[in-house]
């Protein structure tokens, strides 16, 4: 994985010093809260429901054991002994003191981590495929491109005060595991005549006005990537709406201009910018690629696994995925234990996963947008030992992509923007479907819950989506069906009037009953919904 | 306290800047003030007679002026480029990188904060219009053009 | 009744105006009448509080009960982590929120 050189390290350390100075000026009164707020936000520090919240960037979701251990240390020393992994592959802490924030950043900097641009109207952490580098279907590892973009976007002087936040994802497989087309800019690496380049999508997003991004360029060569993306951002910075924060995302600009006109403006800007020498030499991407070269795989490893323990066999079938290298496997660690809080992990659990990464996964792990963790380089012979270790700390739930593998935002339990609680609904649904056999029978079913219209819980992209709203001071939940964040991206449709907290759990059960009744062999919930449409589900819910 | 900050060797422009609309009709004006919604590109044909462009920031969070500044510099403008309005000391480094070379903030800067901001970042990731070598150029001196 | 709340500037803790200063216990919150906005401005300027705002509440025997669930969750803590609330020993505390 990528390692900082002296330049990266000095920039991150300068940011720590800058934030220490800004914090001191706030505490002394030299800065008002109105002035300080955008400064702390561009460093991931929010004022949330109970305290300050710090969001720490995990670039493209990749971490070393040492970095993971630092996350546990911060949870233990400065927070309340746990952290929350987010739908953008980051981690956030809910109980941070402003006066501690500079010290936390200084500790993070010792392991090449930071909170730069994890909030605010700027280019956010670049997200990617959690199986990058280990999946057989990718045309290249997307992470060197993501790292190039990370560096370009860090403290970008022109794009620090965009109309609104800006999220970029980079993938390199036909299978989309990163909800790429629901990003402000989505990049899919593709191959043309043996050369890898970027297929670029723009104007996707969730929130109040969800949009699936249209393609704006079928191929950007490596040597043009930075100037092309710079042109795309400049058009947005100049013409994105600033009169209404709910219409300020690039998706509204692209939608109002139309993809063709936006594309034309970007091309015009790009033609001018390409002349300016903004692109790093190809040697720079090659240098970064060097850090992402395949590790030293062992050859001749056994490919078979002893499945005599039935619980272990279940976990293998559900949570372990095929690796491109014979004898190896990809292990998904579910952070969705039955009745637990989606994405939360205690310091002890984080430490244990760090240990496992160091011992069994070439010192590397990943965070997924579904709020789970991944050990990407596991010898099949080590699977049983890993499963046992995970089971000891309550992390061996065999539910990846099943109905209890719920994405949920923090909701009203933690978030000042929320209208309703999300976690309690996730817990009730997971408990209702607690029977593992029933979950497996329902098969792949992506259930996603947001506590407000901002859609941090990706409800628009859920096969089943739930949106919490405030109805005259009472929590109410709208149900939507048919969304997908994968390569067949689509937006869910609302079923009708909402439900109360218990009613929404019943409603979910009713729609799964319709699926079970109507499905044909091999159909997932989403497939059945797409074939039979909304009507039978509506009848079951309201009929 | 600093109510005007310049990085230029020449005297600051004193001529009152006219509005963007007025400038279009006044062939003798040499100072123009642009607002966030104005298209800086419309000034490009007149750059050789302009000695001062004021870019107004009515609120510090409106970042359109950063693009306006870069567009002018990329087109070869060498006159004074002044950020005015709700400009905060924490913004001047990014503004310098976009080509601003003078500042007249609504609320004066603290000199210590100015000095600290300017000294803070020894390295930058992007090539812009300020002539600073980005880290990729330092990493690959052999392949870097220009 | 109207009560005033916000967060402590250096620690971020949820605090309530208690008449002569700020308290972490909503039970100590006092009715601010129509003085809330003035108090908020004064206390923010003195950096005793950040993000201060006035809310409606109902007086009860156990102290003020905020009208909106969001402020009841702020007053107690996350309903999904009773151990992290201000009343970790009281398993029924969460009922007050709902």
Image (cartoon, rainbow, N blue to C red):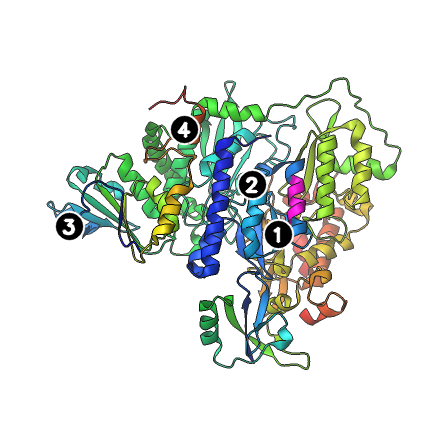
Instruction: Assign a secondary structure to mark 2.
Output: helix
Q: Would you say residue A495 is visible in this rendering?
A: no
Between marks 4 and 2 in the image, the one whose residue lies nearer the viewer: 2
What chain letter is assigned to the residue under label 1?
A
Residue A279 numbered tag: 4
Circle nearer the N terminus (4, 2) = 2
Q: Is there a contact, CB below 8 Å, between mark 1 and mark 2?
A: no
Image coordinates of residue C1 in percent, x first then y, are 56, 81
The segment highlighted magenta reads A68-74
Q: Is residue A106 above or below residue A192?
A: below
Q: Is there a contact, CB below 8 Å, between mark 1 and mark 3?
A: no
Q: Is residue A403 above or below residue A231?
A: below
Residue A109 numbered tag: 2
In the displayed orientation, state which residue is furthest to the left.
B28
Q: CA distance from mark 4 to mark 3?
A: 38 Å
**Main secondary-structure element of the magenta-colored stretch:** helix
The stretch drawn in magenta includes residue B19: no
Determine the residue positioned at 42% across, 45% down. Answer: A160
Q: Which residue is the site of mark 3?
A: B15
What chain letter is assigned to the residue under label 3?
B
Image coordinates of residue C6 in percent, x first then y, are 54, 67
Instruction: Assign a secondary structure to mark 4.
Output: loop
Q: CA distance from mark 1 to mark 3?
A: 53 Å
Q: Which residue is the site of mark 1?
A: A93
Which quarter of the rendered picture does the C terminus of chain B lie within? top left
Q: Nearer the viewer, residue A543 or A328?
A: A328
Between marks 4 and 1 in the image, the one whose residue lies nearer the viewer: 1
Q: Is residue A270 above or below residue C58?
A: above
What chain letter is assigned to the residue under label 4?
A
């Amino acid at each position: 994985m990528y390692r900082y050189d002296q330049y990266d390290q000095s920039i991150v350390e300068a940011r720590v010093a800058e934030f220490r100075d800004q914090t001191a000026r706030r505490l002394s009164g030299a800065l008002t809260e109105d002035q300080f707020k955008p400064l702390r936000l561009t460093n991931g520090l929010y004022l949330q429901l109970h305290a300050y919240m710090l969001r720490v960037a995990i670039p493209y979701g990749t971490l070393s054991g040492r970095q993971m251990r630092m996350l546990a240390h911060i949870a233990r020393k400065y927070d309340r002994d746990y952290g929350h992994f987010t739908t953008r592959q980051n981690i956030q802490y809910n109980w941070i003191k402003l006066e501690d924030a500079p010290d936390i950043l200084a500790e993070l900097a010792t392991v090449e981590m930071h909170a730069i641009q994890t909030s605010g109207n700027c280019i956010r952490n670049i997200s990617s495929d959690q199986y990058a580098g280990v999946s057989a279907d990718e045309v290249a590892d997307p992470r060197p491109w993501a790292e190039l973009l990370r560096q370009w976007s860090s403290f970008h002087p022109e794009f620090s005060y965009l109309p609104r936040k800006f999220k970029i994802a980079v993938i390199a497989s036909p299978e989309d595991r990163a909800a790429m087309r629901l990003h402000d800019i989505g990049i899919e690496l593709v191959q043309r005549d043996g050369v890898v380049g970027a297929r670029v999508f723009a104007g996707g997003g969730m929130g109040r006005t969800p949009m699936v991004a249209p393609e704006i360029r079928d191929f950007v060569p490596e040597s043009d990537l930075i100037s092309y993306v710079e042109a795309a951002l400049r058009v947005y910075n100049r013409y994105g709406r600033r009169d209404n924060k709910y219409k300020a995302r690039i998706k509204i600009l692209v939608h109002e201009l139309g993809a063709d006109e936006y594309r034309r403006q970007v091309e015009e800007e790009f033609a001018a910018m390409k002349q300016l020498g903004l692109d790093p030499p190809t040697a720079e991407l090659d240098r970064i690629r060097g850090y992402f070269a395949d590790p030293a795989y062992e050859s001749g490893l056994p490919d078979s696994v002893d499945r005599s323990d039935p619980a272990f066999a279940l976990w293998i079938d559900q949570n372990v995925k095929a690796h491109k290298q014979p004898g190896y496997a990809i292990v998904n660690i579910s952070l969705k234990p039955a009745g637990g809080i989606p994405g939360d992990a205690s310091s002890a659990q984080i430490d244990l996963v760090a240990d496992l990464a160091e011992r069994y996964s070439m010192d590397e792990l990943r965070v997924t947008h579904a709020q789970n963790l991944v050990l990407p380089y596991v010898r099949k012979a080590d699977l049983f030992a890993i499963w046992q270790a995970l089971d000891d700390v309550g992390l061996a739930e065999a539910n990846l992509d099943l109905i209890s593998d719920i994405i949920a935002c923090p909701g009203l339990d933690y978030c000042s923007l929320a209208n309703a609680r999300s976690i309690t609904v996730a817990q009730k649904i997971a408990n209702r479907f607690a029977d593992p056999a029933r979950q497996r029978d329902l098969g792949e079913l992506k259930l996603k819950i947001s506590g407000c219209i901002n859609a941090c819980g990706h409800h628009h992209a859920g096969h089943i989506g739930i949106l919490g709203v405030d109805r005259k001071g009472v929590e109410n939940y709208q149900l939507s069906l048919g969304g997908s964040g994968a390569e067949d991206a689509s937006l869910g449709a609302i079923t009708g009037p909402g439900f109360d907290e218990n009613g929404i759990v019943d409603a979910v059960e009713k729609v799964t009953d319709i699926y079970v009744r109507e499905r044909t062999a091999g159909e997932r919930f989403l497939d059945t919904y797409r074939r039979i449409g909304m009507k039978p589900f509506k009848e079951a819910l309201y009929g | 306290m600093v109510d005007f900050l310049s990085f230029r060797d020449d005297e600051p422009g004193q001529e009152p800047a006219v509005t963007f609309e007025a400038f279009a009709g006044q062939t003798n004006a040499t100072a123009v003030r642009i607002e966030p919604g104005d298209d800086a590109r419309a000034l490009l044909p007149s750059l050789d007679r302009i000695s001062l462009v004021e870019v107004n920031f009515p609120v510090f969070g409106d970042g359109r002026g950063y693009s306006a500044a870069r567009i002018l510099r990329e087109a070869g403008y060498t006159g004074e480029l002044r950020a005015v309005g709700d400009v905060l000391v924490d913004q001047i480094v990014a503004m310098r990188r976009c080509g601003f070379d003078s500042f007249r903030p609504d609320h004066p800067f603290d000199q210590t904060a100015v000095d600290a901001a300017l000294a803070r970042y020894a390295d930058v990731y992007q090539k812009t219009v300020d002539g600073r070598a980005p880290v990729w150029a330092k990493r690959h001196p052999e392949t870097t053009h220009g | 009744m109207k009560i005033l709340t916000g967060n402590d500037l250096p620690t971020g803790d949820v605090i309530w105006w208690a008449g002569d200063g700020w308290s972490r216990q909503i039970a100590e919150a006092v009715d601010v009448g129509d003085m809330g906005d003035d108090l908020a401005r004064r206390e923010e300027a003195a950096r005793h509080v950040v993000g201060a705002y006035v809310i409606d509440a109902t007086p009860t025997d156990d102290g003020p009960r905020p009208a909106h669930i969001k402020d009841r969750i702020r007053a107690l803590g996350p309903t999904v982590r009773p151990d992290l609330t201000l009343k970790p020993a009281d398993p029924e505390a969460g009922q007050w929120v709902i």
